Image (cartoon, grey):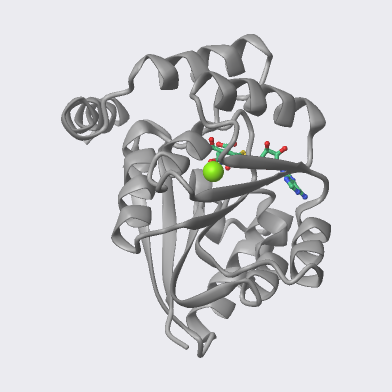
Amino acid sequence: MSHDHYVAIDRYLDDRFAPEDAVLQAAVARSAAAGLPAIQVSPGQGKLLYTLARMVGARRILEIGTLGGYSTIWLARALPADGRLISLEYSAQHADVARENLAAAGLADMVDVRVGAAAASLKALIAEQSPAFDLIFLDADKASYPEYLQLVLDLVRPGALIVADNITRGGRLLQEPPEPDSIGMRRFLDDLAAEPRLTSAAFQTVGLKGHDGMAIAVVTT
Ligand code: SAH
Ligand code: DHB
Ligand code: MG
């Protein structure tokens, strides 16, 4: 099967399960106009995040890697009116675009975009004894996923989900010699599989974003 075929199937599925409304389309357009890379989750992946958040009745969501807030909008829409989403982003420029997109989506009051290196922001959340999160989406620099995993384990409740994007982006998981992203991702997957507090699954994906994959874990204790 060709890449075009995978893309056509994604469009068929997204037409049915993940149609983008004007707000999501505008967020993509505003992000592109601001020069952000078009590496946000696909519509179907956004709907997966939304559905997972609904499955666990999420009231508090933590995202690591905001970009222009596209995945943030999908996730925040799954929250109840008094729900809260905190999204961590290194780039002040990305965060500004995300805040504009979230305001246009009517989600500004529900979402807090925190600028800085995610590891430092996670340590600050732990230090301020943040209430536990129900879903955590890892989607920032891949080399740091192992560190993010250890930190977020202090920020979850039993039953919470941890979702990780891009586990084999562009086939890089098995790349030889490995670059920092592949080394980080292999270590992350080893740690995830071995972590006694989690039950986890990891899978490949193909479609609008090429060949990639995600991992999903549930906190058991
Ligand atoms: N979740 C977004 C895509 C995120 S792309 C979506 O699907 O719509 C990855 C983002 O992580 C980029 O915006 C990048 O600036 C950010 N990032 C990279 N390194 C980071 C770090 N150390 N801390 C926080 N964010 C980081
Ligand atoms: C890329 C894709 C992503 O989903 C991401 O989080 C970072 C980078 C990419 O294709 O380059
Ligand atoms: Mg990603």
Q: Position of residue 152 (x, y in %)?
A: 64, 69
The one nearer the camera, 219 or 181, is: 219
Whether 84 is drawn above or below 44: the answer is below
Q: Position of residue 56 (x, y in %)?
A: 35, 64
Residue 14 showing in the rendered view: yes
Which image quadrant for residue 22?
top left
Q: Quadrant of the N terminus?
A: top left
Give left or right: position of 10 versus 164. Answer: left
Whether 101 is drawn above or below 145: the answer is above
Write the residue at 41% across / 43% down.
Answer: 211
Residue furthest to the top in view is 33
Residue 179 showing in the rendered view: no
Whether 48 is drawn above or below 16: the answer is below
Write the residue at 62% across / 68% down.
Answer: 131
The one nearer the camera, 148 or 58, is: 58
Whether 182 is drawn above or below 33: the answer is below
Which image quadrant for residue 159?
bottom left
Write the residue at 29% across / 28% down.
Answer: 7
The one nearer the camera, 172 or 221, is: 221
Ligand 1 placement by image quarter: top right
Give left or right: position of 151 versus 11. Answer: right
Q: Position of residue 67 (x, y in %)?
A: 64, 33
Q: Count the marks: how many?
A: 0
Q: Position of residue 144 (x, y in %)?
A: 72, 60
Write the residue at 41% across / 65% down.
Answer: 216
Residue furthest to the front in view is 82
